[in-house]
Image: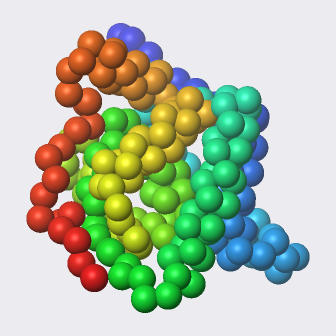
């Protein structure tokens, strides 16, 4: 009679990194790092961590995320740059006289299947001025984000930005399975084949004004 497999414990550094990332997202959503926002964030993160104790020991080893500090810094730096660039673009669009603002909803397929990576990419897009994730289709394979875009000029550029956010998120927090799927997708692109996340534009990407 074989013994039941013992559940692995969550490493302390992994738990601290998870708490820090959740707290950072909470403060970013409020927009101002006040004492009240920090205290309420600590409370919310504690409740979420207790109510949804997913992570190491709950998933197959190849699907468990990893925290990589240097890659996480690259992710934050790219997000900061995208935030500044998008803010400038939106300001120019709004202040330009008699400008016709093109709006559309663009489907952005993802490669990874991790809900953590999906959350990172969706929130990063939403926190960037001019774009907002309005729906996540988890029934599709791969997962598809539907992004409302203000001032759309190139739908494929929006998909490329989403894939770049996802690639950096996978490098910083992704599981071995997600990293392997990304490596396979990049090999397909290098070989001249269709991207693993590619999809033909649909009616949801029609331009509106």
Observer-nearest of 123 and 90: 90
Spot occupied by residue 126 in the image (x, y as percentages of width and height):
50, 66
Which residue reaches farthest bottom?
98
Observer-nearest of 201 and 73: 201
Query: Does residue 107 appear anywhere in the picture?
Result: yes
Say which quadrant the N terminus sits in: top left
Tell me where residue 195 sits by quadrant.
top left
Above or below for 120 versus 66: below
Query: Which residue occupies 20% across, 21% down?
Result: 193
Say which quadrant the C terminus sits in: bottom left
Tell me where residue 207 sits by quadrant.
bottom left
Query: Which residue occupies 33% across, 42% down?
Result: 110
Spot occupied by residue 111 in the image (x, y as percentages of width and height):
33, 36
Spot occupied by residue 162 in the image (x, y as percentages of width and height):
42, 48
Query: Does residue 14 appear anywhere in the picture?
Result: no
Above or below for 10 versus 160: above
Query: Which residue occupies 62% across, 67% down?
Result: 88
């Amino acid at each position: 009679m074989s013994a039941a497999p013992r559940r692995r414990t969550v490493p302390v550094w992994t738990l601290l990194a998870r708490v820090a990332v959740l707290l950072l997202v909470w403060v970013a959503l409020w927009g101002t790092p006040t004492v009240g926002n920090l205290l309420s964030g600590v409370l919310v993160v504690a409740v979420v961590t207790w109510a949804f104790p997913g992570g190491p020991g709950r998933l197959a080893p190849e699907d468990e995320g990893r925290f990589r500090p240097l890659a996480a810094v690259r992710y934050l730096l790219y997000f900061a740059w995208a935030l500044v660039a998008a803010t400038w673009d939106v300001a120019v669009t709004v202040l330009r006289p008699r400008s016709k603002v093109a709006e559309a909803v663009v489907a952005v397929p993802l490669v990874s299947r991790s809900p953590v990576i999906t959350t990172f990419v969706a929130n990063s897009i939403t926190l960037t001025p001019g774009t907002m994730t309005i729906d996540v289709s988890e029934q599709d394979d791969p997962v598809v984000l539907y992004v409302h875009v203000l001032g759309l000029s190139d739908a494929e550029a929006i998909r490329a930005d989403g894939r770049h956010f996802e690639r950096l998120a996978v490098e910083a927090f992704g599981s071995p399975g997600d990293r392997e799927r990304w490596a396979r997708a990049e090999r397909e692109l290098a070989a001249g084949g269709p991207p693993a996340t590619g999809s033909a534009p649909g009616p949801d990407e029609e331009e509106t004004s």
